Image (cartoon, rainbow, N blue to C red):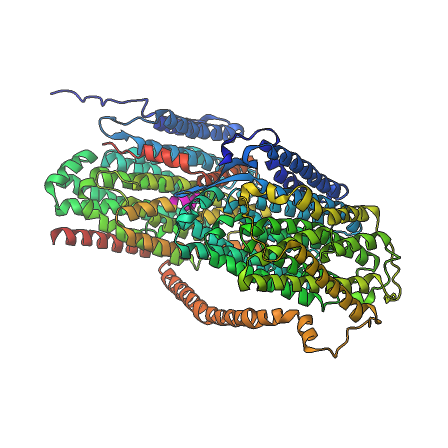
Amino acid sequence: MDGVAAPDLSFAALAPLLFVFGAAAVGVLVEAFAPRAVRHPVQVAIALTGAVGAFVATLLLAGTREVTAGGALAVDGVALFLQGTIAVLGALSVLLFSERALDPARSAFVAVASVPAGSVRDRELSTDERVQTEVYPLASFALGGMMLFTAANDLLVMFVALEVLSLPLYLMSGLARRRRLLSQEAAVKYFLLGAFASAFFLYGLALVYGATGSVRLSAIRDAAVVEGGDTLLVLGLGLLVVGLMFKASVAPFHTWTPDVYQGAPTAVTAFMAAATKVAAFGAVLRLLYVAFGTAEWTWRPLVYALAITSMVVGAVLGLTQTDVKRMLAYSSIAHAGFLLTGVIGLGADGSGPGLAATMFYLLAYGLTTLGAFGLVTLVRSGEGEATHLSQWAGLAQRSPVVAALMGLFLLALAGIPLTSGFTGKFAVFRAAIETGAWPLAVVALVTSAIAAFFYLRVIVLMYFSEPAPEGPTVGVPGLPTTIVVAVTAAATLVLGVLPGSVLDLADSAAVLVG
Amino acid sequence: MPASVPVDGLLSVAWLVIALPLAGAALLLLGGRRTDRWGHLLATGTVVAAFVLAVASTLQLSGRPGHAASIDLFTFIRTGGLDVSAGLLIDPLSAVFMLLITGVGALIHVYSIGYMAHDSGRRRFFAYLNLFVAAMLLLVLGNSYVALYVGWEGVGLASYLLIAFWYTRPAAATAAKKAFLMNRIGDVGLALAIFLMFAQLGTTSYAGVFGEVGLLAGGTVTAIGLLLLLGACGKSGQFPLQAWLPDAMEGPTPVSALIHAATMVTAGVYLIARSAPVYDETPTARTVVLAVGAVTLLIGAIVGCAYDDIKKVLAYSTVSQIGYMFLAVGLGPVGYAAGIAHLLTHGFFKAGLFLGAGSVMHAMDDQVDMRRFGGLAKRLPVTFVTFGLGYLALIGFPFLSGYWTKDAIIEAALDRGGWSGWVLGGVAVLGAGLTAFYMTRLMLMTFFGKARWTPGVHPHESPPSMTAPMVVLAVGSVAAGFLLVQVFPLAEWLEPVFGEPAEAAHVVAPAVVGIVVTAVMTVGVLAAWLFVGRREVPTTAPVRVSPVVTAARRALYADTVNEALVMRPGIWLTRALVWLDNRGVDGVVNGAAAALGGSSSRLGRAQTGFVRSYALGMLGGAVLVAGALVAVTTA
């Protein structure tokens, strides 16, 4: 009998992953050994190096189409495009984390997370300028998990990646310096429900393995052709989809989203809303098209129904929200539905316009939502961020620039022409219509109109209301947040006005191997 | 097409003629207060430069075969089957207009330096004036109907802005709105004509349209011709869209002179003359043009007899004179050159008359009521002489401008032959008599007789910057007609555009026509002296007058008709729509919003904040998903 054969690893193709995981590992060491005074700048530098390095690596790898690591990882166009997107969003998020000019205590993150919320020690620490820097290696690990998620060619690797990205996020959700109880509650909720969802995914994995005898996506596809409508296989598919839809915050598996988005530190919320969505949809695309591409008629009605539910729930529930972060959470749920219309718009063999449209949408939505949350960190009152909508009344008079930029992001989220949101929506809706799913596109248009109401309501509030007498102040951001807002606003405009080259890039990258 | 000859020399930079005033307008509007001190000089400079360039390119043009140059600039719209290139067409017709616009425009810019010297909005005024000149030049120089339309809307905008220049006066604001709305009616006609051309011919360039218009069905060509006429009527203040032009006199007087006498209002004549190949195909539309011209020239002349407002009399005179031009171009090839010649001479003397009226108003503290004038000849000698020469030119005093060009039109109308020739010729002769009457009345009430000035008014002559352009225009009023008809015949210059006019058999000998018209004119002058000059002019208008005078004073009930036919139904329609919107549309929208909001808050109760209920929801979803999938596959 042979020994265990080492799998063949193409290190070049894994370079993006190696960058972020390397940065995470170095970050842990720095956290343990570097003196407190230098930790913050060093950690920021390491995390940024990891993310930017990963992004550059994806650019250099463009065109690579291979299956490596013993068949466990697929480095193809979709994986690289989404990894690049995640790396950019990650780098921008790290910049948001590192903002020190806004909070009087010089950081949005708690000094010592383990101190019970509301205790005497906690109150002392709330104004302490000490900063917790674990958030940077945690973010790098999450980033690595997300990038691994989009490239996983094997259900087990996919599960591992899911956990690698989830566990740091649970922790990061609880790190808010202000409103610590809310933040910790969010972390616990996210953790409990996340574990619940992981269990579904794992059970589905077991069922699929039972039905096909393999966890490799390509093997599952081959077996699915032979097995046909095997109950075990279909049940497994259903549970896998449930697990992934939870991460993508698709209704009815969305319930955690508003609470966690509201409770988590806003920079972390931005990271979750933008990057997690990209990763989750990367995995959804891979699972549905690589493993179950031949069984598309079993999952197509399911995705159809999920898309409609998510769009309707997100748009309708968003109407009555009074908190900006919760509103953006419901927006995220509605957008998950719009993204699923792109997923529908894809032929059985992975061809068709839907794949490129979905990838473009993910990039556009990620950048816009990151910018919107970035602006939420600027509007502050005495006890931290002022997220209640009534506090945003008349913001345009206090800070025309912030109001104008927020207006831009909200218009993009609503899908108004000349913003990236319109280009993305147009692309996914067209893809859905071209594959005959026009009823879905009609629902998507109606829900877009409903959702536009709550975006525009904020704009009306900012521009046409009298400012509240003791309203919030608009903080002057430091360089990092300024960069994030500028980059995301520019991208939102450019992808709306001149989307051609990026659409072409997404088109040429729309290749799944495995 | 002669356009195949490559464009070189100054003609290749002919776009500068448009670009210079446009740049001036942009600089003045964007530059803000910094340009307050020298902005008006810059604006005047750009128009003078444009005039020099226009003269030079016209000279160069006369050396080219076919006297035409087509200049492609860039692609304006390219989408699907529509390909609109922006380009210029400089041919004898557009060159004539280019000279008129830049020449008169330059003079009026100079005049405005004096006239607007103390106005706080001087910079804005010059910016709008420059904008107008640029748009008007684009209108006449464009090589397609789309370019014409862009200029058409541009002059409409500039006209609106300038009529409402003193926008704090309610009358000015209302007049601007009225002008804008009535122009819109015409603009819709022009737009529809362009759509029709594109739908039927697939092109909107002059070359393309004129080349293929003969292939179209007769009804289509007639429709295009009538729609173009509607556009022309709106812009030129012709029946039934004439009512806005007199009200437009609320704008500053240089504006009335430039836009509402010399240039913009003649755009309709240009449009019809330019579209000659279209009208050649459709006698029906051409007859309508004739009718519009004849009716308008009478309406304008009759109403002009009754008004006491000096600028409004001149405005109705403009309406009437443009009626002559419409009549001329409606006659077809025999009339085009006559119409354009009258347009040019009219541009000189009417601009001069308006500038003179402005000078009088300047002297009389901005009063316009002629019943408060009188005896100004001695106080304003330069104004009196220049205005008098313009007056003589307008009424067709022998051998001055109007005599040559108006006679040509009357001759052409009579030469049409048959009863229609007699009717049209008769109307034109009658109009000449009325013109002599109302203009003599104006002269007598303003410059002769006893002074009826409002106490405290001390008339004084205007500064040289104002009188100099008046002198130049007066010289033009005297000489232009002779030059254009006898020395440098305009008809020959325009031949490449309109073709060689067939020598018509004269129904009445030209000499006889000249004598008859002069006689009728003399009767008009004498009648005015009898009714106005001999007697004391009351300082308030008499109330007890014949029904004819009442009708004329009310502009032959044009506004009454407009109100009854358009305004009231419009108001009713608006009210009905508002009602429908409030009750119907808003009801549905609000109802939908309320329903969505209600379901939102009801659904929102599921968001309890308890992890256990969230988990239960997820479990429910998962059971549904799994159950549905299994049910579907096993079924």
**Front residue (pair B582, A236):** B582
Task: Decide: is A3 above or below A435.
Answer: above
Extreme top residue here?
A2
Q: Residue drawn 49% across and 72% down?
A: B576
Report whether residue B164 is seen. Answer: no
Q: Is residue B112 in the magenta section?
A: no
Task: Decide: is A510 above or below B584.
Answer: above
**Front residue (pair B635, B405):** B405
Main SS class of the magenta portion in the image: helix
Residue B392 percent coordinates (x, y): 76, 56
Which quadrant does the C terminus of chain B fall into?
A: bottom left
Asked whether, in this view, residue B180 is left or right of residue B400, the answer is: left
Q: Is residue A422 in the magenta section?
A: yes
Residue A25 percent coordinates (x, y): 39, 28
Asked whether, in this view, residue B198 is left or right of residue B50, the answer is: left
Report whether residue A277 is seen. Answer: yes
Q: Which residues are magenta?
A: A419-424
**Front residue (pair A32, B182):** B182
Residue B600 percent coordinates (x, y): 39, 61
Q: Residue drawn 33% across and 42% down?
A: A358
Residue B1 percent coordinates (x, y): 48, 36
Q: How many marks?
A: 0
